[in-house]
Image (tube, grey):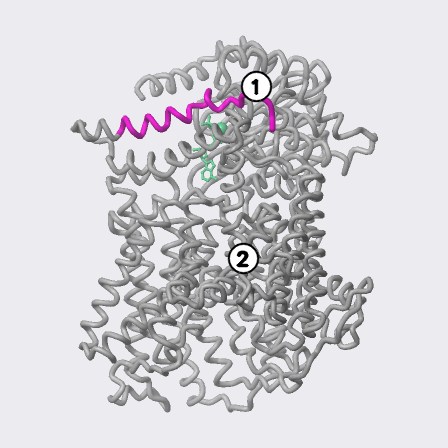
Amino acid sequence: MSAILETRDVVVRFGVLNAVSHASIEVVEGRVTGLIGPNGAGKTTCFNVITGLQEPTSGKVFFEGKDITNKNPYKRARMGIARTFQKLEVFGSLSARENILVAAEQRKTWDRSGFDPNKVCDEMLAKVGLTDVSEFMVGTLPTGTARLVELARALASNPRVLLLDEPSSGLNEEETEEMASLLRKFVDDGLAVLLVEHDMSFVMGTCEYIHVLDFGTIIATGTPAEVQANAQVQAAYLGTETVEEAS
Amino acid sequence: MRLKVSPRLISALVVALIVLFLITKNWGGASVNAKTISSFLVVGIALGGIYAITAGGLVVTYATTGIFNFAHAAIGCFLAFCYWQLTVKQGLPTLVAIAITLLVIAPAIGFLLDKVIMRRLRDAALVVQLMVTVGLMLTFMGITLTIWSPKTGRTLPQFFESSKGVQLGDVTATWHRIITVVIALLVALGLRFLLYRTRLGISMRAVVDSRSLAGLTGAKPSIISGASWALGCMTAGLAGILIAPETGLVVDNLTLIIVVASAAAAIAQLKSIPMAFIGGLIIGLAKSFSSVYLEWGTDWAYADEAIPAAILFIALLFLPMARLETGKIRITKRTERLTKPWEAALGAGVMIALVGAWANGWIPWISGTTFGERSAVWLGRGAGFMVIGLIMISLIPLIGWAGQVSFANFAIAGIGAVLFSHFGGQNGDAIGIVFVMLVCAPLGLMIALPALRLKGLYLALATMAFAEVADKVIIRHPNMLDPSATGVLFKPVNIFGITISSDPSDRRAFLMFLVVTFALLFFMLEMLRRTRWARRWIAMSDSPAASATIGVNLTTTKMMVFMLSGAMAGFAGCMFGLQRGALSVDSFPLFAGLPLVLLLAVQGVRYPVAAFMGVIGLASFPALYEVLGKPSWLSAIELIGPGIAAIAMAYRPEGAVFYSGRDLAGLLPWRKDARLEKELMVAKEREQNIGKDEINDMGLTRPFTPDKVAQLDRVLDITDLVDEKKMVPTGGAS
Ligand SMILES: Nc1ncnc2c1ncn2[C@@H]1O[C@H](COP(=O)(O)OP(=O)(O)OP(=O)(O)O)[C@@H](O)[C@H]1O
Ligand SMILES: [Mg+2]
């Protein structure tokens, strides 16, 4: 299996801080790839590099074998990269339906398959279970629901790769489970998913392959079992656990 | 290897060539010798020093509070007048007067502004932040003009005016100039020291990034932001006092220094104080160079005054592209829903009916006044208000939906009016209107072009600079508007059998024509709001980063809305010309365009109906004067109107239309949702405005006194009310 999306030796420096150093990540079609790591490890920064919101200091990003490092964010979206955000980036003054519709209509600019944006929108609403609240301004929806709107919006552009940044934060247990089963469904449809997540049972249950970031460096890659057994990973996580307990 | 030429280098070369061309073309013939050079330097450095002080203060306020203060120079102007009052009028010694002005009045203004207004704006939308300070600027201008009537001339003496100054080569540097330069240096060093070496300064810088971070440094956030504003006002006042002897105590001139300060702030990328000083110096030197060496000729008589604006535009070209930031969106709670087509049609009908009924005398109300009798004067005024309404409505898609704060539309309308006088207007040819719209659409785009890739604030600066250039340079060029041709520039135009012109006999028909076109535009905008274009603009405004990641090309999306707005402003301009009949060179000053944007923003810049409410608001003052017989309290209200508007916006950021709409809906027994949402929104606002400040101010340090706990409880209680679970929408969407 060859990777559909790949970062090679990506480095991002903010002043003196190496947010990401020489991170190489591979995302393969038809499976969920995990990207985990303690707070501030550089996961979101990696997402920003992949989607073009953050220019890397060095390193390259490849999509379907093409170098997209210098492409505009919107061009990457048109190639088939979609994402959600850790801190909500919904269109708060549009309704849930309109949020998704914007993405579906935008897809018209590059997808000539003659689909009906309104229909796509209905499908997506049904898929994530938002049909009931579709007419509400997203600004008035609770965070968990708004997160689903973001997910549906990302899906509406019919991406090849979907990047999810902590999709379970703001969701309760039940909703998290639903999210996990949704993810499985997308992947079975051939989507490639890169998942950043703090909920370990969620990660271990959904990901087939995991990259572990710590202080911007990939310290381990492998299947969930391999990663869990890795001593370095345990150390990294133990370190944060103690911090969390203290706070 | 391919030769890679950086686009910046190319733009630098192009700019340099243009500047060289302008210099050679307008060379005044003064020989370049030690004398001219030293006078160029002495004047330039002194002027630059003053600009540097005011720009430095502006940048400090922005960097520490996140709010760009358009009122900065207006406050400086007010303080300069205060100083004049104290020295010249009351005869106080200079130093005492300076101390009172800069150490008492200026900080008082700063703390008051912070306490009453600015603190609430921290999380407000850009348009609200900007419009509040524009409102303040107009208020300070108004107050100054009222207290110190412009009819009497005033001069502020220079420092040590009687003594000779210092001989530098062939020129004398007056003590005033030398003091200016010394003070500028001291202020620069002082600000630098304050912000980087003192606890207060470091907290000031921290506060803009993170309120909680500032809490850690141990200072109260409210004191920190108050100090920032006080500091800003002090620098503004200092600059005002120093420059007034050179430019004269003239409100407009002193307030326009904001354009200079903005240009320097743009050079400083809004954050670097040393660069703000260098920027100020560059502008001072450029102006002095122009006055010593260049001769602009009668056609470009005012080109000199456009130098700061031009420098601003050049600075924008070289600023690095803005990152698409994430995690900064503000989720506000709104009960907003799409207007249905029949509702929009009904609204348009009501507008036509209302104006039509008044114009045709179907309202038998308040007769006995010229307003009630609808004299020709009043019909003309009514048409004038509708024209302003047309300009305001052109801002709805641009500012309200796409979030692009532009102050240029009044200037575009001005250029449109002038163009129409050349093409079509003189012959009463309606095709000219179409032509003007076709020119104004790309014009709107061109103004925005340098700022498209930058933060929204730069666009506001660029459009303001353009408005100034349009007024001073473009419209005053004899080929555009010949000052000697004072006659009627526009012949009556016949459209669909209606003759429209400024002629008294045509005024009623013109007014009806205007209200019908206005209502049509209103309806079109409401329909446009339901299309993918408006959706995309709003999405772009709500979250540029998310828009880009779903494939929206932000540049072209912005371009579209600028063209639409430009065309609408061009149309409004043609109507402006027709309504006035004649134009004078000073018909379109920057200060006349700003109140329109403010008025619209107060009404609610996202809602097309707000433009109509703005028209009614405009008409209400003169109408009340007529009906009530010119009471003096009314003129007082009119004077501080912008100030009231500014404060209203700080507390009611969505605009009057929104709140009154929601409250009206809440009165209907079946609109429980509107009542519930109002409750939630009010609670949410309280939490945002008070909660954080109170917690921060308490510092959450031991010991926890009962007072503190009670206060904390109250804060948390409010937070409880906006608990997410209660936010789940109940009932059907309506
Ligand atoms: N724009 C920026 N400027 C400066 N530093 C930044 C910027 N964005 C992120 N950082 C820093 O880079 C580091 C990595 O941040 P990032 O958000 O990628 O971490 P993360 O793994 O997503 O963490 P979390 O689990 O908390 O979301 C952090 O130390 C952060 O403070
Ligand atoms: Mg993150």
- Depicted A39 relative to depicted B21: above or below: above
- Depicted B498 relative to depicted B670: above or below: below
Queried whether the magenta region covers residue B195, the answer comes back as no
Image quarter of residue A72: top right
- Where does label 2 land, which residue? B597
Residue B247 drawn at (x, y percent)? 40, 79
Which of the chains bears the disc numbered 1? A
- Chief secondary structure of the magenta portion: helix
Q: Is residue A113 left or right of residue B302?
A: right
Segment tinted magenta in the rendering: B712-734
Foreground: A199 or B571? B571
Image quarter of residue B491: bottom right
Which numbered marker is on residue B157?
none
Under mark 1, the amino acid is Gly
Which numbered marker is on residue A34?
1
Q: Residues within 10 Å of mark 1 (few under 14, many from 20)?
A: many
Image quarter of residue A3: top right
Residue A10 drawn at (x, y percent)? 56, 34
Q: Is residue A77 left or right of residue A166?
A: right
Q: Which residue appears at 51% of the width and 31% of the height?
A: B674
State whether discs 2 and 1 lie on one chain: no
Residue B2 drawn at (x, y percent)? 71, 53
Q: Is residue B229 visible?
A: yes
Question: Between marks 2 and 1, how big is the CA–CA gap?
Answer: 49 Å
Element under disc 1: strand
